[in-house]
Image (spheres, helix red, strand yellow):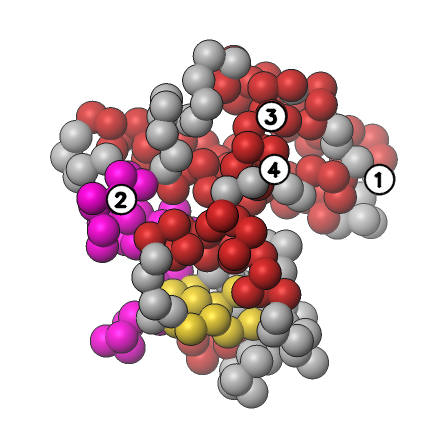
Amino acid sequence: MKLYFAPDTCSLSPHIVLQELGLSYDLVRVNNRTKRTSEDGDFLAVNPKGYVAALELDTGEVLTEGPAIVQYLADLKPEAGLAPAAGAIERVRLQEWLNFITSEIHAGSSPLFNGALPEAVQAIFRERLFRRFDFIETSLASQDYLLGGRFTVADAYLFTVLGWMEGFSIDLDRWPASARYRQRIGARASVQAALAREAKIPPVK
């Protein structure tokens, strides 16, 4: 398998999952601006959508969209417990969280990357995010992970997008359970290994 990534993006989520599962994979860095890869290829030929993550399978097929990729990976090694079995109500709960993270946190924070937005407009997006963080805080106040007592692919995704908040001058200490959650996941060996491996690949022009 081959994972296409860019630093500080949602591609960190499937990368963490690959490390959690101990699967073999190649790592290809993408320049989000030029769409060139560390293999001197055209990323648009891999994923015409133009954004990471993309996972190229050994068959040559390419999977895109983080929530789909992480579930595919989890199902390769169900014994690892990163996703409940397909068809179980717990799997639907996992999908609820993945959809919430992608639509309300990931997409909800995307406008804040646009520094040209007036402060008044940014404040509207931040306030909406804060309401979503209040909901997450309520869940994490009584359990270590989104689905209870075990780490799943949803936690890899939430950890990733919460990492962007510092760049938006959003202090997660306002939500103490969420701040502790991010510290706890950040200390996992899989996270440290994924970040270290990404750092070894030089930037692409």
Q: Look at the image and tell me whether residue 100 can be seen.
A: yes
* Badge 3 amino acid: Arg
Looking at the rendered image, the disc whose residue lies closer to the viewer, 1 or 4, is 4
Q: Give the residue at mark 1.
A: 118
* Badge 1 amino acid: Pro
Q: Give the residue at mark 2.
A: 80
* Badge 2 amino acid: Ala
Looking at the rendered image, the disc whose residue lies closer to the viewer, 2 or 4, is 2
Q: Look at the image and tell me whether residue 102 can be seen.
A: no
Q: Disc 1 versus disc 2: distance between alpha carbons?
A: 46 Å
Which element type, helix, strand or loop, lies under badge 2? helix
Which element type, helix, strand or loop, lies under badge 1? loop
Q: Disc 2 versus disc 4: distance between alpha carbons?
A: 24 Å
Q: Is residue 108 left or right of residue 113?
A: left
Q: Disc 3 versus disc 1: distance between alpha carbons?
A: 32 Å
Q: Residue at x 14, y 35 (%)?
A: 87
1 and 2 marks in contact (CB < 8 Å): no
For the magenta stretch, what is the residue range?
Answer: 56-83
Q: Disc 4 versus disc 3: distance between alpha carbons?
A: 12 Å
Rendered location of residue 12, percent (x, y): 52, 54
Q: Give the residue at mark 4.
A: 162
